[in-house]
Image (spheres, rainbow, N blue to C red):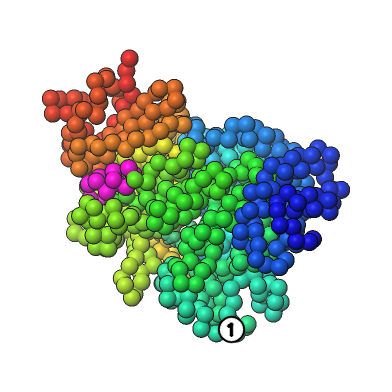
Amino acid sequence: MNYAANSSTCLERILQDLDMEGLTKKDATLFTRRLREHFNALFEKYTHVYGHQYDCYFHLQKLIEILRDGVRNRKPSLKRIDAERTKAPLWYRDESQVGMACYVDLMGPTLKDLHDKIPYYQALGVTYLHLMPLYDAPKGDSDGGYAVSDYRKVNPTLGTIKDLEALATALQKAGIDLVLDFVFNHTSDEHAWAKAALAGNEQYQNYYYLFDDRSIPDQYEHTLREIFPQVRRGSFTYNEHMDKWVWTTFNSFQWDLNYSNPEVFNAITSEMLFLANIGCAGLRLDALAFIWKAMGTNCENQDNAHVLIQAFNTCLQIAAPSVVFKSEAIVHPDEVVKYIDKDECQLSYNPLLMALLWNSLATRKTRLLTRSMQKSFSISPDCAWVNYVRCHDDIGWTFDDAVAQELGINGHDHRFFLNQFYTGRFNGSFASGVPFAENPENGDCRVCGSLASLCGLEGALNANDEKGIDDAIQRMLLLYGITFSIGGIPLLYSSDELAKLNDYDYLNDPIKLHDARWVNRIAVTNSDTEFALSAERSALTVQEDASLRVFRGLQHMINIRKTNGVFGNAQTHIEESGNDHCFAFSRKNSDGETLLVVCNFSEHAQIVDSRLLTDRNWRDLLTDAAPSISEHGVLLRPFQQLWLSPTP
Ligand code: GLC
Ligand code: GLC
């Protein structure tokens, strides 16, 4: 293909040469229409990144063939979903939405077994199931599946692609969307591309960042953050076989892909469309902040990373338009929001809310939470937060130091305190967490642990402390209650709903031992789910009782969320509660429905300013009762949250 400087000339030339033989007439029309609609955007992004390369147009032409094949391979049932969702694109803002993330082996143990779990998901109101990476991966350590050896093959211990498609269909029938991981920053060193590189194939060596000696890696490392310092210092790994240094941001067996090579963009787009065509509603963009490298920077959140993600998104608009992106950017809050846009990632994890909920539990103070949410919660009305409390990873304290500074909090010292608090090293802490990725040089670390253990249940059970158990349960419900009500998709992390304690078994497994995140990757067995679903049971142990109280408490809140439009597409306003221990926000939707949420983060009763209530009468949706109001204000019990709805 010859040089074509503007997008319309370029498109016409591509269309002239494009072989549409394999497409039905209907598909050919559909594809051409979408291509005409989106080509200009794709052209701009693609040439922005690759335009200076002599063969840019050749690769762009190849990319269009990949998109054509994506349309050809898309099942009619998925095309129907494309049509429906294009008409109602904001489905993810609906109050009916509730997510759950789980590992197949910890809940299945195979994909086939997950069919039996559908009633359990339904009992919790789950509408979106994120299955953690389930692709073929190296035996032994595979970073919990995040080292992918083949995107087109399910890990044989979990099943097959056919099983996955069958599950997607069954979930769909039950009103549950499938969400899959798209691990596109790196592959495992056993991926066919890596193997070819290892064998000396230069084309595939260019798929990765390989260096003959330390000189360039040393220059990069001046400004790079170390992600897993417990595994290896620095971001590069020496490979003896090739006698080269490989860029490995995460584990040494996870090789970063080289997106400055357009062939990589094209190849991974093809993998992405394969995943989209399995039948998922969303792709979780793993580690997306790291995909572009630039000397002298920290190689995170670079402008071209955004341009590339937008280009991927445009590819989906053309080939699988019902599939949305969820951003996993666990970075500075000002950088997190830059990924959120209807043309980039429609959904994003909300790591700031997550971290600050834990901060407020530890400090019993809400000023940092309130200020930070006032600054960062509001995003485009076309997009939605995915609000979570725990996940399979560690907790990093990614708040904005400048906001903390305004409140007289020193970010560095405060992170140190939070780490001490949640790893139980701080006197009087209720939490049983485990440090992760401790950096021997600067003492930094992050925190692992299950919801229940971090909320104090483990310690309280060990101490036979009834009040401690009660407090722990209230803390769990409080944190989740905020994710259900503040706006966005709440995402349950499987095992949280049953208040499962830390699983220390990983310490007995030499493959897992170095990675404390396994402490919060916890099995939910058949007997657990049967227990949760069975009606009244007598003779519960103290722990079973706690588990059931959390399960039912969550169910109760989810039911309320689903039956009230104000929890769906509405605007959130973060309020001043007038009390340092309390967090408050209000919501309003276009039907004029409103909600006022007030939460007490301390183990003592608190009073908030009744001016928050304006002059209306309110009812608490959680207790179906009027709030207690005295001359001093609204009374909240320890850890109480009020979901206040105005009464006529
Ligand atoms: C993401 C995943 C994490 C993994 C990393 C590298 O942060 O959540 O589990 O280790 O990416 O893929
Ligand atoms: C990503 C995140 C980091 C997280 C890690 C996995 O690098 O930025 O916060 O801890 O993945 O553990």
Hey, what amino acid is under mark 1? Asp
Residue 389 image point, x, y percent: 39, 47
Compared with 539, 455 (above or below) is below
Residue 561 image point, x, y percent: 42, 30
Compared with 193, 405 (above or below) is above
The front one of 243 and 149 is: 243
Q: Is residue 12 left or right of residue 565?
A: right
Residue 207 seen from this side: yes
Q: Which residues are magenta?
A: 362-374
User: Could you tell me what secondary structure mostly forms the magenta stretch?
Assistant: helix
Identify the residue at horizontal 84%, vertical 39% (top origin): 25
Query: If the image is split into quadrants, where does the N terminus sit?
Result: bottom right
The front one of 34 and 233 is: 34
Residue 508 image point, x, y percent: 43, 67
Residue 531 image point, x, y percent: 44, 39
| Residue at the outermost left position | 631
Ligand 2 falls in quadrant: bottom left
Identify the residue at horizontal 55%, vertical 48% (top origin): 344
Please tell me in which quadrant of the rendered image residue 567 appears.
Answer: top left
Q: Is residue 140 left or right of residue 42?
A: left
Query: If the image is split into quadrants, where does the C terminus sit?
Result: top left
Residue 73 seen from this side: no
Q: Is residue 92 left or right of residue 333?
A: right
Compared with 630, 12 (above or below) is below
Residue tagged 1: 212
Please tell me in which quadrant of the rendered image residue 262 appears.
Answer: bottom right
| Residue at the outermost right position | 21
Q: Is residue 609 magenta?
A: no
The front one of 481 and 352 is: 352
| Residue at the outermost top position | 648
Q: Is residue 372 magenta?
A: yes
